[in-house]
Image (tube, rainbow, N blue to C red):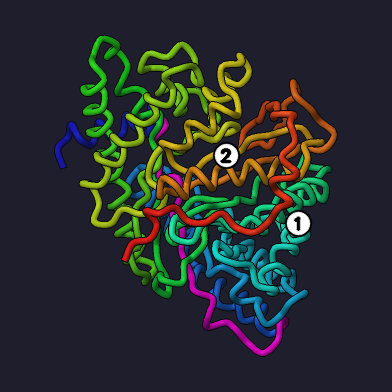
C-alpha cells in the first residue's frame, strides 16, 4: 500500500470521523427449534453464545490491527416470529433468552425480533406482534421490526393499523425512559434480508447459516472532501462523492473478508450507507448544506439528497464483491446534529422528511413526536412511508417515538449514537377513518413481474 494511501486513511479516522459502524453476524435459528418454548429458548441461547462467542474479540482485534474503529459488534437472527409460531403466547420466553445471549457475548444489539406480514398476518404472527411492547420493555439489547408491505405484495393495512397501537403501547411501557423502547422498533416496506444496521436487522430465510455483514460509515469523510469546492457544478460534486465512497467501502471489504475468515463464517455483504452520529462533523445534513443549502430541509434538499445517495451507491459498488443491506444515505433526526439543527430552526419538517425518503435509504427515522399523538396518526405515517417504498421499489421504514408526557418544543435525550431528538409537530387532522378501513393496498402494476 502506498504511503499516501495509509496517511489518507489515518487522516480519515483521526479528523473525519471515519469508522466501520458495525460488524454484524447473521445467524439462522432454525436448528434451535424444539418441542416447547422453554427448550427452544435454551437451544437458542446455546446456539447464539457458541457461534458468536468470538465476535466482539475479532472486531476489537481488527480495529487494533488496521487502525480503523469498529464501533459496534452486533448479531441478527432469523425472524423470530417463525421460531415462535408453535408457541403462541410464550414469545417472551425466547425473547429473553436472546437478550441474555447478547449480553453473554458482549454485543451492542441483537436484531431479529421480527415478523414478515406484507401479504397477510397469521394468528401466530399477530400474537407475536402483540408481544413486542412487553419484549422491548423487558429486554435491553433486543431490537424488533415488522415488514408490512412490498412492491410485489402491496401493503397489509391491518398490520399497519396494529403497529400504531403497538408503538403507542411500547412508549407507555417505557415511559420512564421517554419511550425508549420505540427506538428499538422499525416498521418496514421492502425489508432486506442482509441489513447489518439496527434496529431493523434480521437474518433472512434466504441467507446462509452464519454470515458476516459489515456496515461502513463516513459522512465526515464526504463532508470534508466537499470543503473548498463551493464553485463546482453538481456533476463534479457527484464525482467527488463517488471517489470518496469507493475509498470508504474498500476498508469495509477488507474488514468483512478478514472477519469472515477469523469467525469461520461466510462473507455476506458490505452496506455502503452513510450513517451519521450526533458528533459535529459527522452529519449527512451538513453534507447537503455544503452543496449550497442554507439549512437542511429547505427547497432543494431532496434534489441534493438524491445526488448524494446515487453517488454513494455508484462509488461503493465498485469497491466490494457484494453490496447489500440498505446502502445509501441515512437521515435519522436524533442521530445527526445537522438534522437536529434543521428541525430547531424550522426548515426541516415531517412532511419534508417524508419527501426526502423517496430518494434515500430507509425513511422517517428516529423522530420524536408528542406523546399524545394518536395511534392512527402513527399508523398513517407508516402507511405513507410504505406507499413510497412500494411504488418506488425501495426499502422504506418508520422509527418514530411518541414521548409520553412531552410535546413540541421539548427535547428527549437518548444518549450515545441515538443522540437527542427535538419533538416534532404532527399534522393535527385525523387519519382514523382511513386506518380503520383495514384490508390491503394492492401492489402497483409494475410489481407484477415474472
Q: Quadrant of residue 88?
A: bottom right
Q: Is residue 91 above or below residue 60?
A: below
Front position in the image: 86 or 266: 86
Magenta residue span: 17-38
Q: Please identify the residue farthest to the left as the structure is shown.
A: 2
Residue 284 visible within the image: yes
Image quarter of the N terminus: top left
Q: Is residue 427 left or right of residue 55?
A: right
Between discs 2 and 1, the one toward the N terminus? 1
Q: Neighbour class for label 2 at 10 Å: few (<14), some, many (≥20)?
A: many
Q: Is residue 413 left or right of residue 249?
A: right
Q: Is residue 404 above or below residue 129?
A: above
Q: Is residue 348 above or below residue 356?
A: above
Residue for badge 1: 133
177 is within the stretch colored magenta: no
Q: Position of residue 282 (x, y in %)?
A: 46, 28
Residue 195 visible within the image: no
Q: Is residue 2 left or right of residue 378?
A: left
Label 1: which secondary element? helix
Q: CA distance from mark 2 to mark 1?
A: 19 Å
Residue 212, numbered circle? none
The number of numbered discs placed on residues in the rendered structure image is 2
Label 2: which secondary element? strand
Residue 365, numbered circle? 2
Say which residue appears at 46% left-offset and 63% top-offset.
Answer: 25
Say which residue appears at 52% left-offset and 52% top-offset.
Answer: 189
Q: Quadrant of residue 243?
A: top left
Say which residue appears at 82% left-offset and 36% top-offset.
Answer: 372
Q: Neighbour class for label 1 at 10 Å: few (<14), some, many (≥20)?
A: many
Q: Position of residue 62 (x, y in %)?
A: 37, 53
Q: Position of residue 90 (x, y in %)?
A: 76, 75
Amino acid at each position: 500500500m502506498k504511503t499516501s494511501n495509509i496517511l489518507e486513511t489515518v487522516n480519515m479516522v483521526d479528523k473525519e470521523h471515519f469508522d466501520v459502524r458495525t460488524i454484524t453476524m447473521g445467524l439462522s435459528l432454525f436448528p434451535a427449534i424444539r418441542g416447547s418454548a422453554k427448550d427452544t429458548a435454551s437451544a437458542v441461547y446455546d446456539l447464539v453464545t457458541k457461534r458468536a462467542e468470538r465476535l466482539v474479540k475479532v472486531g476489537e482485534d481488527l480495529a487494533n490491527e488496521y487502525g480503523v474503529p469498529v464501533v459496534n459488534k452486533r448479531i441478527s437472527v432469523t425472524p423470530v416470529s417463525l421460531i415462535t409460531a408453535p408457541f403462541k403466547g410464550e414469545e417472551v420466553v425466547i425473547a429473553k433468552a436472546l437478550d441474555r445471549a447478547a449480553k453473554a457475548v458482549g454485543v451492542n444489539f441483537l436484531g431479529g425480533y421480527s415478523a414478515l406480514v406484507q401479504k397477510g398476518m397469521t394468528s401466530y404472527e399477530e400474537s407475536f406482534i402483540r408481544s413486542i411492547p412487553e419484549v422491548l420493555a423487558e429486554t435491553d439489547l433486543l431490537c424488533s421490526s415488522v415488514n408490512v408491505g412490498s412492491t410485489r405484495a402491496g401493503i397489509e393495512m391491518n398490520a399497519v393499523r396494529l403497529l400504531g397501537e403497538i408503538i403507542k403501547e411500547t412508549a407507555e411501557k417505557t415511559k420512564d425512559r421517554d419511550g425508549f423502547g420505540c427506538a428499538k422498533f422499525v416498521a418496514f416496506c421492502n425489508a432486506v434480508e442482509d441489513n447489518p444496521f439496527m434496529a431493523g436487522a434480521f437474518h433472512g430465510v434466504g441467507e446462509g447459516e452464519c454470515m458476516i455483514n459489515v456496515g461502513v460509515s463516513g459522512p465526515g469523510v464526504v463532508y470534508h472532501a466537499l470543503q473548498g469546492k463551493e464553485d463546482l457544478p453538481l456533476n463534479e460534486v457527484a464525482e467527488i462523492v463517488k471517489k470518496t465512497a469507493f475509498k470508504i467501502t474498500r476498508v469495509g471489504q477488507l474488514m468483512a473478508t478478514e472477519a469472515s475468515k477469523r469467525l469461520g463464517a461466510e462473507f455476506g455483504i458490505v452496506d455502503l450507507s452513510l450513517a451519521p452520529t450526533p458528533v459535529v462533523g459527522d452529519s449527512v445534513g451538513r453534507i447537503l448544506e455544503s452543496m449550497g443549502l442554507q439549512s437542511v430541509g429547505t427547497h432543494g434538499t431532496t434534489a441534493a439528497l438524491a445526488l448524494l445517495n446515487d453517488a454513494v451507491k455508484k462509488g461503493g459498488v465498485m469497491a466490494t464483491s457484494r453490496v447489500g443491506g440498505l446502502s445509501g444515505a441515512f437521515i435519522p433526526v436524533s442521530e445527526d446534529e445537522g438534522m437536529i439543527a434543521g428541525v430547531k430552526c424550522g426548515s426541516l419538517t415531517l412532511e419534508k422528511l417524508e419527501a426526502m425518503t423517496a430518494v434515500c435509504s430507509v425513511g422517517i427515522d428516529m423522530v420524536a413526536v408528542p406523546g399524545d399523538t394518536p395511534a392512527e396518526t402513527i399508523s398513517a405515517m407508516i402507511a405513507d412511508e410504505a406507499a413510497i417504498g412500494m411504488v418506488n421499489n425501495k426499502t422504506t421504514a418508520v422509527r418514530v417515538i411518541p414521548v409520553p408526557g412531552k410535546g413540541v418544543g421539548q427535547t428527549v435525550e437518548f444518549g450515545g449514537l441515538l443522540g437527542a431528538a427535538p419533538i416534532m409537530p404532527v399534522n393535527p387532522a385525523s387519519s382514523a377513518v382511513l386506518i380503520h378501513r383495514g384490508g390491503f393496498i394492492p401492489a402497483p402494476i409494475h410489481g407484477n413481474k415474472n
